[in-house]
Image: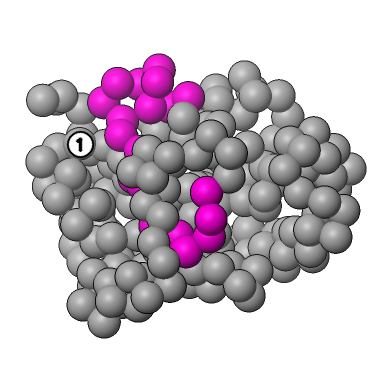
Amino acid sequence: MTSLSPVLLVLAGPAGSGKSTLCDRLVTEAPEFHRVITTTTRKPRPGELTGVHYHFLSPEEFDAKVAEKAFLEWAWVHGQKRYGTLASSVLEPLARGESLVISVDVQGVESFRRSAASNPLLGRRMTTVFIVVDHDRLIARMRGRAQDDEDEIAARMRTAERELREAPKFDFIIESRTRDEDFATLLEIVEKTRARVDRAKS
């Protein structure tokens, strides 16, 4: 059990912004952090494993979880697939004193904000972070991943433009540069968040 104040970092940003990489690195280099595994109805990409990268559910299985009110948030993404976060996967670890990091889309962050408004544990511990990437760099990153065709990249860029308009609502913004610079900024945000939590306790 760590003596550090547990916090929840909620990261968002366009596809290709590096939010998943930041989450993975934080979990690797800051052992008190655990990544929240979200749930999706999309098919696994090559190399992805259920329970490791996502919980992959069929639409019918997802519907059942929604009916049970098991999700803290869920949303349609790109108008086709659904993503969600089980409440138990966030609230229980926080209550045990574990720090968490999660990557979601801007719709999901808005749902987190609504939940935090009525849940004191979330309200005290949560910080939202948006990663901003310039247009040319974002396209280059998407092409570099070689996971999507040009039509899919165009669709993701349209989504990115909408998401960027939500950036001012976030507690912190990372202007993406190099991976090391982005991670250093994220660590600074962790310290500022912990300081805020500690002040609230005193």
Q: Is residue 15 left or right of residue 85?
A: right
- Residue drawn at point x = 62 percent, y = 19 percent: 180
Give yes or no for residue 176 being in the magenta stretch.
Answer: no
> Where residue 124 sits: x, y (%)?
25, 53
Task: Tell me if I can see residue 157 in this picture.
Answer: no
As shown in the figure, which amino acid type bears the numbered disc 1? Answer: Glu
Bounds of the magenta segment? 25-44
Q: Residue at x 63, y 45 (%)?
A: 131
> Quick check: is 30 in the magenta stretch?
yes
Query: Where's residue 184, x and y in %?
Result: 55, 23
Tell whether 93 sits left or right of 174: left
Q: How is the image coloured?
A: one colour
Does 41 appear above or below 80?
above
The image shows residue 28, relative to residue 160, as above or below, that is above
Q: Residues within 10 Å of mark 1 (few under 14, many from 20)?
A: many
Q: Nearer the viewer, residue 123 or 150?
A: 150
At horizontal 15% and vertical 24% (from top left) the residue drawn is: 2
As displayed, is residue 23 above or below residue 201? above
Quarter of the image for the C terminus: give it: top left
In depth, the one of 145 and 50 nearer the eye is 50
SS assignment at label 1:
loop
Q: Is the N terminus in the top left, top right, bottom left or bottom right quadrant?
A: top left
Could one spot residue 35 in this view of the protein? yes
Q: For residue 175, what is the image quadrant? A: top right
- Residue 179 spot, x, y in % from top left: 65, 24
Toward the viewer: 2 or 22? 22
Q: State the image coordinates of residue 125 (x, y, percent, origin top left).
A: 27, 49
Question: In the rendered image, which residue does mark 1 sit on?
Answer: 98
What residue is at 63 percent from the left and 37 percent from the top? Answer: 18
Q: How many marks?
A: 1
